[in-house]
């Protein structure tokens, strides 16, 4: 059975209430339930994890990065600041896909730099929460 981990970084636990004009109205719990159900429908185990703590995200990358078929990660604000998350992604075997709800390149100047992008197998941004499902479908139906 395929196994895919979906990892979310800081402040994504506030989906549905945090800047709904940018991030939408769905909660992370609702989204996770839909990803898990979609995976089950297609014989894929989807594991979801969220943390506001950089080290916990690194632990999750390492815990899933050698036996999962893929990892989707939205590092949140760590996208622009965390060399440690970048290095964790580079160190694992599983392909990692960077996902962003908004389109960082169209936002503030500091958001235009992604430290993780060059070590990811691909990614999507600016499609809202639908971006996660687009990548998930791409991996499952590959």
Image (tube, rainbow, N blue to C red):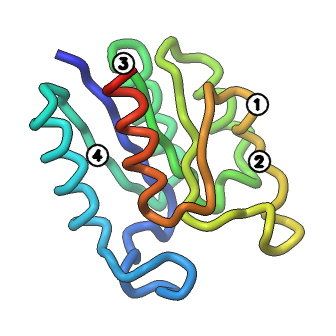
Report which quarter residue 98 is drawn in. top right
Q: Is residue 61 left or right of residue 116?
A: left
Please rate how many residues cluster around mark 1, counting C-alpha atoms within 10 Å: few if below 14, some from 14 to 19, many from 20: few
Q: CA distance from mark 2 to mark 4?
A: 22 Å
Q: Identify the residue under disc 1.
A: 118
Q: CA distance from mark 3 to mark 2?
A: 23 Å
Q: CA distance from mark 1 to mark 4?
A: 23 Å
Q: Earlier in the sequence, mark 3 or mark 2?
A: 3
Q: Identify the residue under disc 2.
A: 114
Please rate how many residues cluster around mark 2, counting C-alpha atoms within 10 Å: few if below 14, some from 14 to 19, many from 20: some
Q: Earlier in the sequence, mark 1 or mark 4?
A: 4
Residue 54 in the image: above or below residue 46: below
Q: Earlier in the sequence, mark 2 or mark 4?
A: 4
Q: Identify the residue under disc 4.
A: 48
Residue 38 in the image: above or below residue 63: below
Image position, residue 30 (x, y; %): 22, 67
């Amino acid at each position: 059975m395929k196994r895919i981990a979906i990892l979310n970084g800081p402040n994504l636990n506030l989906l549905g209430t945090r800047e709904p004009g940018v991030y939408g109205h769905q909660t992370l719990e609702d989204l996770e339930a839909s990803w898990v159900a979609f995976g089950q429908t297609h014989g894929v185990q989807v594991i979801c994890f969220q943390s506001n703590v950089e080290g916990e995200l690194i632990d999750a990358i390492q815990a899933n990065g050698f036996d999962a078929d893929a990892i989707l990660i939205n590092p949140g604000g760590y996208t622009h600041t965390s060399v440690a998350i970048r290095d964790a992604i580079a160190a694992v075997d599983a392909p990692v896909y960077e996902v962003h709800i908004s389109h960082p390149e169209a936002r503030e100047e500091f958001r235009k730099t992604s430290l993780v992008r060059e070590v990811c197998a691909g990614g999507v941004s600016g499609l809202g929460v639908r971006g996660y499902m687009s990548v998930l479908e791409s991996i499952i139906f590959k």
